[in-house]
Image (cartoon, rainbow, N blue to C red):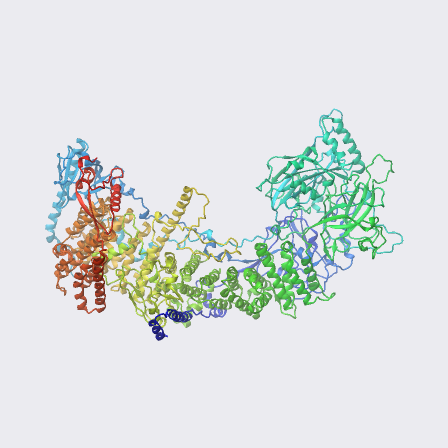
Amino acid sequence: MERKFTRGLNKPGMAAQLRESVSQVMRDSAAVSKPLVVEPIDFEAFIAKNKTLIQNDPQRELLIYPADDVSEIIMPRKQRSNAKSVADRFEPPNEAIVCPLHGSMPLGSNGHSHSQVSRQGSLQSNGSYQNGHSSSTSLSNGNGQLSRKSSQCSNGSTSRKLSHESYESALSSTTLRSHLAQPEEVDEYGDGDEEHAAGEDVIDGTTAGTRAECTRFTRQALYTYRAKNHLIHYKYSAYGGNCHDLPSTSPGEELLEEVYEIDADQDRIDEQMTRSQADTITKQGYLLKGPDSASDRMFANIGNKSFKRRYCYLRQEIDGTYMLELHKDEKQGEAKATIVMDFCTEVVQNPKRGRFCFELRMTAGHKSFTLAAENEQDFKDWLSKISSVLAQNKAQEEKRNASLERQPQTTPQLQPPAMEPPTFGTLKGLDQSLHPQLMKYGRETDHSIAQARREQRRRLFACYQSPGKAIAGDNVEQYREHFGTRILLSCRSLRFRLQCLPTDLADGAGGDQLCQVEPYITSLALYDAKAGRKLSESFYFNINEASAAQLLPNTPVPASVAGCGVPRRSESDERNASQAPHSLFDGVSSELLRCPRQQFQQLRQCLLSVTAPHSDIYLVLRIEKVLQCSIAQAAEPYVKAARDAKLGQKVHKAAKSCAQHIGHYRQPFAWAARPLFKAYSHELDVDPQREFDFNTIYRQELPKLKDEELLKLLLDYRKPEKLSKLTIIPGSLRLQLQLLDQTTPCGLSKSLAPLSSFSASAKQPLTLELAEFQGQHERDAFPYTNFCNHLYVYPLSLQFDSQKIFSRARNITVVVELRDGDGEYSKPLKCIYGRPGQDLLVSQIACPVLHHNVTPTWYEEIKLRLPLGLFPEHHLLFSFYHVSCNLSKKRDAHAAFETPIGYAWLPLLQKNRICLEEKLLPVAATLPVGYLSIQPLGLGKGQNCGPEIQWIDNQRQLYSVGLRLDSTVLTSDQHLHNLFAHCERLLEGGKTGALPAEMETCKILKAAHAIDMRSLINFLPTLLNELFTLLVHTQSEEIGLNVIRLLTNIIHLISDEANRTELLSAYVKYVFHAPYYSQQTARTRTVHGELCRHLPYLLNPSNTDFLIVNKFMRYSSIFFELIVKSMAQHLLATGRIRMLRNERFPKEYADRVEQLIKVLVPYITTRYEDLGEETQQLNRSLARFVRQCLSYMDRGFVFKLIRFYMEQFAPGDPRVLHEYKFNFLQEICQHEHYVPLNLPFVLNPKNRPPELLQHFTLSEQFCRQHYLSGLLLRELKSSLNEVGHVRRHALAIFKDLLAKHELDARYQQRGQLSRIALLYVPWLGIVMDNLHRIDDLSESGACTPNGHVYADSASYTKRLSCSSSYVFSKDSSNFGSLTSTPRSKNRLTMHIDQPSPCRTSVHIKEHNYLAAIAGSAISNGVSNLSLNSNSDSGHSQDTTTIGAYTNGETDVALRNGHNRSVSVTHAQIPSRCDKFSAGESKDLLLGFLFIVKHLSQDQMVGWWQNCNETETLQFLSILDLCLLQFRYVGKKNVTLATDARVTRPTKAHTLPARTAPPVLENGHQEPSTGTLTQTREHLLEDMDMSARSQQALYESNLATEVGMIILDCLGLYVLQFRQLLADSLVLPKLARVYLRFLQLGQSERLSKHVFAALRAFINNYSMALFKGNAMLCGQMVYELLKACDSRLVDIRHESCAVLYLLMRSNFEFSGRKALTRVHLQVIISVSQMIGNVIGLNNARFQESLSIINSYANSDKAMKGTGFPLEVKDLTRRVRTVLMATAQMQAHHMDPERLLELQYSLANSYASTPELRHTWLVTMARNHEQNGNLSEAACCHLHIAALMCEYLRLKGGCTLNWSSTAFGKISRNIPLDEQGLKLDAGAQDSQYTEQMLLEQLKQCADFLDRAERFECLGELYKLILPIYERARSFIELAHSYEHLTQAYNKIVEVNRSGKRMLGRFYRVVFYGMMYFEEDHAIEYVYKEPKLTSLSEISERLAKQYKEKFGADVVKLIMDSSPLTQLKLN
């Protein structure tokens, strides 16, 4: 392979072949690198074997799976009504199948039962099937107690227990007729006023034949409505989601306000300090500060103009030093200048400059200050005060000098005896200090420090939980009755203009009070004009005044009609009539019968329900009156009615007479309508608070009576011109409408069942609920939940115009009744709902009469209660009568006013099902017995059977009638009906009929796919129950498959076409109660068993219809939920839940589950592209299913399933598959008992000490025992080599899981989390392996509030790397680049030196093909470069990335250096080298910190013991990175997530499209502020601010906690490995982590602990600081000084103390001679800080210096040594430097001036190489930032010259040249650098030849960048000899290569002339007042390259406008000469 590869490289045009071979190699390697999924342990066996170990484990609750995990809850249905109904009489049928679906626990439909939820755990689970045949009825007797009566079966069989053990098949009882319960009160079925109860028919029906009372469909539906809900309850389910779903932990984490310096207000000086200073002020007031005195000034006498008014304080510091501070005003902001009075020698008056002017003369080298007072008094005062201060200082100085002279004599007594070995304990003797603070430190111990850190700890994921991200739980509600908008309608009054005086009043009494003329029969209904249909049933109400109401009869038909007794038997007729077995329907509830009749007569209130409100819904009123004459005649007086009282009386009289004779008959009279809702909105069209009127009442027109005509009128309602032709009857109906949300007050349901709010004794009016008729749209359909069985009959029209039989047939009415027989004495059933004033249920109703009309049409609606069982004998009988209106005609006293003129009948069943089409019927003149047997042939051609009969009009169909069914136990859907009829034969056929053939069953099941959608939804639970019953009952494979196909289709129809998935979810959750079939001969068939048996066959790719597969994939979750619920119910019902896991299910069941999984998983891995959504759904539901199997099945078996799943995926898969895989893992890991499933304990084999290493790496043993966490870690590890998206997804899941552990209320006891951390220990190793990829934030250059540069900014790193004290240790550690891994044995690393971009040193072993591809890492078969072209490669643009192979075997063999994450299970994977994004890095580190925080100390120490030094260093580097990554950036810089893109699906079952995969958040909790529609900026800003401060609060707490964890960790390490640390590389690294705390600036709370740790460190390890090179000490001093300048007073004081202890430690270390090292480092650091323009010359820093002094003075142990004076001397020197550099602060805006100052400073330190070096580095950096590369190069050349002078002077080196060698490059270099002297201060400098070489290389780099190619030759003349001596040929080659390039460039630029080295500009400043000494002086400015005039002018303008104010700066840009005087 290799040879072919290289051969191919040389042939031109072979690119394709090259690519092919490389990809081949990669494919092989990817195949190799697929993680082997470890075989899990046999979980159940393992537990059994280690039972005692587990039982005795102190943390056994983490190991033992809870026994009470699953139970079943049986929850009664919520019932709206307490009334009993006929449905309660039914035993659940179908006992031949022993299945709980039909277990005979009837529902106690007691109103109080919703609150009682009985939990049925595994123990009592048999209870629900105890009472075999005994029916128990329950009702509320008065007190609401539940009484049960159990009536024994009348056939004498005692109740038999159907226990599951016997599995008897109860085939004997074929019918259930005998189990009717006797009614509790006979009264219930009749109306109190009748002599006999209609209910009797019902009761003595028992004698009839053995026909079943009703169809299986009705029985099953009734059972569905009565069954209780069965829920599977998971006790710990709250812990089964992601961490956002957890119940909130009991002690809610309060976040503390952390105080950070970065948030401190810059201008507000801290109050504590101000207060303490107020006491020390000796004088304050305003002075004028003059320009600094300079004798050579030209305009020295220009008056007061250049004086600035300043408010001055003269204060005495803690150590006695006096300060003069100058502030802008009295507010005590930042001081503008501070003068240390120690340096002031005298104060003299200066009358030259002004009258009250004086000058402070300073010691040599400092310029003096000119000040002036505002009046004479002040002037004298200030002079005397300052003079006295100076005198005091002088006295002190003399005293000190005297003591120094005496010193030599006093020291001998004070020195300790020489025998005592010197100890360097810094804290020694501190406890005798006079300073309370120092005494406290003296008592500290390592233990007390660690103990203090335990207080006020936070959880790492304290606020990670956000409720917004919780998975929307399955908040499916159980089925309930659905009402739309509910409107309460109350009718108040109906008044016409026509009125009359009441006749029955005594004359004169209230005679002027008018009343209504006659009674009206009124009804209301809703119509939908848009859909053209009637929307609700009609509401008949009584609105008559009492006097008028009395005129109406209280029966629906006259006695003559009721008792007419048809049919009559003619003598000759011998036929038998047919009679139904018996009709079973509800009577009136006994509660209603207790109501006063009055309430029903006055019924005026109803409740309307509108599902889909819109503006075309009308409320229609119809008014009828007693039959009298034609409509026009009747209306005439109403229309004409004036105030003529006589007219009213006349009408009243006529009406009264009619009512007496024919009051039962009505005629249509008037109608009115109005829209219910406003247009374009669904609000009511009326004010609900007020009554409103129907003002326009129209007269009924004869041709427009029918509903169709009415709907046409309504369509034109809003067009007045159309309605203007109608006659209006003056009058109005007053109503009130209001929306109702609470329960119906005193209500009755549509079947007159009293609702729970009803009470018989209540005085309030009754409210009747009206039925809303279901629309055509399936979205309005809901599953039925209550029993209701109504039929509405609509007589439509009669064509009697051509009949010749009856002479008088003009005023025609039709009387409707329902009969169940056609015998001689058969009676109508009392099942029609009566009208107000009549009985509640009546047997007949008559329709209104049209006067003198032979073709009447009707709009009447007659509502009946249907019997439960319908038989062929049930029919509607219509009798037609002519009613005589001529009352004046003579007739017999008993003669009736009506004559029968014909009959028609309509059987309800056709082909055994109810038929609802509109019917046309012939009319017979007579009605013989047995009329039902007449089969009319139509066409009038005779008849084939039945009695003789006379037809009218030759048997033409004269009469039309419409029907409407409103029933929850009957269906008009043919297919649904057929299915149940067939099941009845199949399941209940018993011994009588032959069982149908399998073919027929399959045909019926196939036809059932076509069930109408609305029927499907209405009867969904009943249908599904039946299908599951059929599934377990059938033995036929074919039927089983067809049932599942039908199920799949039903689920598809409901979810997809109707979009109503929630109906299925509710079914599964509440209704489904798994049936199972069992006989002694056959094995038990269960739903889960059958589903798992048939599904693999159906879904097998070889024999599948792909539609089934697609539908199944999409809705697989429902099938899986059914399987799981069935498993649970089976285990609970049989008590197997208490058995061992491996014995619970039969063996074949596990095989079936495995088959199912094996069939499904390939679909996920192959069809993810074309079926994205389906595969996503399948993957999700499969994961849920496998996860739930872990709760029920053998866990080892389920682990094997997981293993099978994981093996289908490989690294390098498409991103979608990675997403699927991790989503699957996430679901499994969210199992509520994830921890016990992982067995978090270390197993000791045969009591050997455990091989700890096995538990720290992803070894086979680890992965087998902790199966799930091992799997997750392995996948995570391999995901880190994938694209960014995959990594982020995986890490987010991991983070979520850890957060969940930490917040889980079950695991908060001590030691529990440390066990859980044990499951993730290998993560530590994984992070270490990826250390080089973690983002070390080196790009950002953020600043702290004081302008300190952050330690992680590149410039800081560079500065440190060149600062003198750092340069000394280039070799000891890579501080500059944190993440470059130390090169350890056998670990390939890529190491890139930062400064030189030209040279990348790469170390590579084996696998030459990697080298062949020029450095682009190929990871898992996909090239890195292409993957990371997006943001991922942000960090790797300038570096060549090379995959490094980790050689697994050898690493494991290395006992000492275990490569932590390399596992036996991983083959070799080329690891990537691109950087992680910030978010990924944080997630990676959070996991690391979680483990470090929670792992027990012994485990942690064990882990460290297995580390070699390199690994320990890496470990510390990671802690360092943690500090960087989680540092707090301040409120202003907190970044909010721009958009929380984590869209969570709203419903549990609907997913967002896969195209937008979940993007996981980068940082922590992203406050998901949704998109705001308001554009008001301030609102957004406010929200942003609060979110920001919340985020800042969270981040600050997190940063503090991270710091605490790291301090704990370091503390533990130092304690355990104290001996090892002494001279290892680990110590400096440790110290560096401590320094990192200081560099980043921590919160006040954390800082206290950091300083405590530092004190301990200085105490224990002073060696590290004071021996060897000074870098560590220098860095520590720098950071401590920075902290001494902090705005937070606590931090300042703590750091002063530590700095003081550092000095003390150094003094002790040097044998009490001096503190040279700290002294020098302090001065260097102060210089560096000033170089970084950190203004130290302020009150805070001065105060800190004074505190250090006072510590030294009060330290008893140091009295009498030179120490206090040394400290005094040091603080004095620091103040000197500060004074000298105070100007820098003033010019920090002006780069040119600043650099000049720095240059002069560097020169002033010519004799101290360190300080000069410091200033040169600072200058070089500033030049580089300003783009002046030539100048920066010069600075570096000066440094090199300085080094070589030092080396030459010090001697002992091979250099034979000095700084003169640089003369050829620049003649200034030898001039400046030759003055070096080595004084005592330099003893600490340690330049080496190697450093000089590095410096020279850096110079070469800068010269090259500055394009000064000519100088390179001279420079290399110095470099090359060094290389030649060392024989380093690689470097020589590089050098010559560099020179070649340089000389070539010289040639090129000389030829082209294109080299711009800079541009020069002349700049003159004018303005004495502002520019002071620069006034009228001309400067030349050098600008880089091609800077244009406009650029420099803009820069200078901006610079000076910022300095002096925009209004005073003016630019003159022409070159003509200027006259100064003309300037303003």
Q: Position of residue 1757 (x, y in %)?
A: 20, 53
Is 1490 left, or right, of 1176 in this rendering?
A: left
Camera-side residue of 1232 and 912: 912
Residue 1999 sits in quarter: top left
Residue 914 sits in quarter: bottom right
Q: Position of residue 809 (x, y in %)?
A: 82, 42
Which residue is at the far top?
508
Camera-side residue of 1077 and 1439: 1439
Which residue is at the far right?
572
| Residue beneath the point at 64% across and 67% down | 1038
Count of marks, rendered view? 0
Image quarter where the N terminus lies is bottom left
Q: Is residue 1015 above or below residue 2023?
A: below
| Residue beneath the point at 54% across and 60% down | 1114
| Residue beneath the point at 85% across and 46% down | 805
Q: Is residue 22 above or below residue 644?
A: below
Whether residue 180 is visible, yes or no, is: no
Is 1862 left, or right, of 846 in this rendering?
A: left
Q: Position of residue 1656 (x, y in %)?
A: 27, 57
Image quarter where the C terminus lies is top left
Is 199 left, or right, of 1626 in this rendering?
A: right
Whether residue 1615 is visible, yes or no, is: yes
Residue 1272 sits in quarter: bottom left
Which residue is at the far front?
1951
Q: Position of residue 1966 (x, y in %)?
A: 19, 39
Camera-side residue of 1723 and 935: 935
